[in-house]
Amino acid sequence: MQISFLLDHVDEPTLAALFGLLVGSVFGIAAQRSSFCLRAATVEFARGQLGPRVAVWLLAFSTAVIWVQAAQMLGLFRASDARMMAVTGSWSGAVIGGLMFGVGMVLARGCSGRLLVLAATGNLRSVVSGLIFAVVAQMALQGWLAPLRQALAGLWVTPGGRNVDLPAALSLPSWSGLVIGLVTAGLALGLAYRNRIGARVLVFASGVGFAVALGWVLTFALSQQAFEPVAVTSATFSGPSAATLMFFLTPDRGLGFDVGLVPGVFLGALLAAAWAGELKLQGFEGEGQMRRSMAGAALMGFGAMLAGGCAIGAGVTGGSVFVATAWLALLSMWVGAVLTDFLVDQAGARVRQ
């Protein structure tokens, strides 16, 4: 993919930020219109249902895998160059951080990506929770919580200074990832048909997966033609949330893909909600919900940084390139969320009855 004509007019950091803005906007529109949310899918699953939320999540995940694997087969992307594949992975971080994130997203009633989308529609609960998420993520990255994160992540790491490529580790052929994506998409479409999900929702759910692939392809193309090193990455909301927060709080912070991504998601979700007439100010329902949401956001902020990504970053973006620790983190998020819904929400409902 040739982008040299763009580099003739825009410097590399600015172009990376514009790519982030584009990817974020596509993601924000698609996620808002499809109500894409890992937390909603895990709650449905915890309650013995394979309903519309599970179908939407599976379709978004599978289309990300299909688009990314197809792009790799066409030479538009190389998974081995992905930032999360090129660094040492943490098995312990994936498990502990994933569990923490799963617990947190149920308590906060949304994963970090969903909170950002809801904040754009006027949900003040999501604004507060999103800010707490970003602050704690920054603390875990470079602040007071960084030593704890590093200690937990260092308990069990991948060998060789790199993460583990699942298909290669399992001696699977190069086309196996595409087949896995197609099979998962078939399952998602079957669930969508059973739950009578309309074509519009399916198109936008697929758009979430397309946004992830778009990010990989654009940053890879930039890395191949830029003079300075460029991280090959895509949609995630742990590091970018912290980076965006610091960009607006400190002077001389450089532009980049991460800095463009979060405003892009907000803008896309805002425009989509305005078009659909769904902009509405909403606040906390009470002190109990406020405490619960704040605690959940803090758990997600630390958990995402420890796990190497959030529900989007590890669960979809990392999963689409078959990073082993990302798949383990995603599994841990599901386990943490299901257990929290069962032990907190379902148990609480039985007590009130």
Image (tube, grey):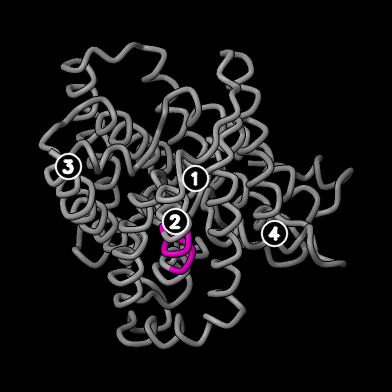
**98 within the magenta span:** no
Q: Mark 4 points at which residue?
A: 245
Instruction: Using a 10 Å C-alpha cutoff, classify the residue at mark 4 as few (fewer than 14 neighbours), some (14 to 19) or many (20 or more).
Output: some
Q: Give the range drawn in magenta.
A: 296-302
Amino acid found under the numbered disc labelled 1: Gly
Which numbered tag is attached to residue 352? 3
Which numbered tag is attached to residue 291? 2
Instruction: Using a 10 Å C-alpha cutoff, classify the residue at mark 1 as few (fewer than 14 neighbours), some (14 to 19) or many (20 or more).
Output: many
Q: Image check: 29 left or right of 172?
A: right
Measured in 3D between alpha carbons, the distance from the residue under mark 4 to the one under mark 3, in whole angstroms, is 40 Å
Q: Quadrant of the N terminus?
A: top right
Residue at screen point 58% across, 83% down = 144
Instruction: Using a 10 Å C-alpha cutoff, classify the residue at mark 3 as few (fewer than 14 neighbours), some (14 to 19) or many (20 or more).
Output: few
Q: Quadrant of the C terminus?
A: top left
> Residue 70 lies in what quarter of the image?
top left
Which numbered tag is attached to residue 113? 1
Of the numbered discs 3 and 2, the one sitting upstream in the chain is 2
